[in-house]
Image (cartoon, grey):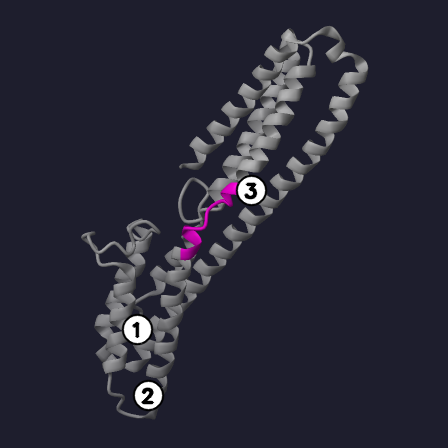
Amino acid sequence: MTSLLLGAMVFAILVAAVLCGIVVRDRLPAHHLSLESKEAIRLATAVVGTLSALALSLLIASAKTTFDNAYSEMEATAGHVLLLDRLLAHYGPDTYADRKRLRELVQQRLDGRWSTSSQDDDSKESTPAYRDIEAVQDDLRRLVPADQAQNLVRTRALEVSGMIAEGHWLKIDSGSEGLPWPFFVVMISWLALLFATFGLQAPPNKTVLTVILVSALSVAGAVFVISDMANPYAGIIRVSLEPLQIAMDRLGRA
């Protein structure tokens, strides 16, 4: 489910809750909406509103943390790719093919053909990303260093390539996390109850209804942001590829 669709569904649920509150209000006996009754309703909904605000803030914090971690992983991967390229350059001309393969791997990511949904699909025309980095690792293991200096460079290059492979699988894991759906459903239920009481108590005029609709739209917007940031490699709000682009510009230099 896309983030925009999820936000639209939340908005529709909240608007439906308001309408249900309005319909119920018109059918209730007058004494059910007395000042005492409304005060009791306000006290009860204050608890629900507080719980909803806490739940929403926790989801926002969780999504922000996920997004920041993904960006840090992207920066680390770009740095490791650039470091591996320099190590291969220092090793000698035997690693030319691996440097070219490394550049193709980064270009594949920049072109959008390396995503959490397709990067490991063997049926695609392009080689899966993990196969590219594993091919580089296999070539490094087959190298026969001519001296101690080349042996040290080869050992360090294997370590860095392992970090790149690890970052690749971390990207897949973070791309499949998404929202904690049970927690999310409970929060939406609380919000729907809260907006139903708005419709139950609010006077039927355009100003009040407009404010309630704007509030519903604001909550739906927050849900959209949470959902989009919880999937940092897809959607509208996604991790910037600038670190990889900077690395790409420097790859292959002598």
- Magenta highlight range: 173-182
- Asked if 246 appears above or below 37 in the picture, the reply is below
Q: Position of residue 141 (x, y in %)?
A: 27, 81
Numbered disc 2: secondary structure: helix
Q: Are the two marked residues, 3 and 2, in contact with CB atoms closer than 8 angstroms?
A: no
Label 3, residues with CA under 10 Å away: few <14, some 14-19, many ≥20: few
Can you name the residue that lies furthest to the right here?
A: 36
Q: Residue at x 64, y 36 (%)?
A: 52
Q: Which residue is mark 1?
A: 254
Q: Nearer the viewer, residue 174 or 93?
A: 174
Residues at marks 3 and 1, CA–CA distance in whole angstroms:
53 Å
The amino acid sitting under disc 1 is Ala
The amino acid sitting under disc 3 is Phe
Residues at marks 3 and 2, CA–CA distance in whole angstroms:
52 Å
Which quadrant of the figure has residue 157?
Answer: bottom left
Identify the image quadrant of the C terminus: bottom left
Q: Residue at x 26, y 91 (%)?
A: 146
Residue 180 on the magenta span: yes
Numbered disc 1: secondary structure: loop
Residues at marks 1 and 2, CA–CA distance in whole angstroms:
20 Å
Numbered disc 3: secondary structure: helix
Q: Of label 3 and label 1, which has the lower sequence position?
A: 3
* Comparing labels 1 and 2, the label whose residue is closer to the camera: 2
Q: Which residue is mark 2?
A: 151
Q: Residue at x 38, y 80 (%)?
A: 156
- Asked if 108 appears above or below 158 in the picture, the reply is above
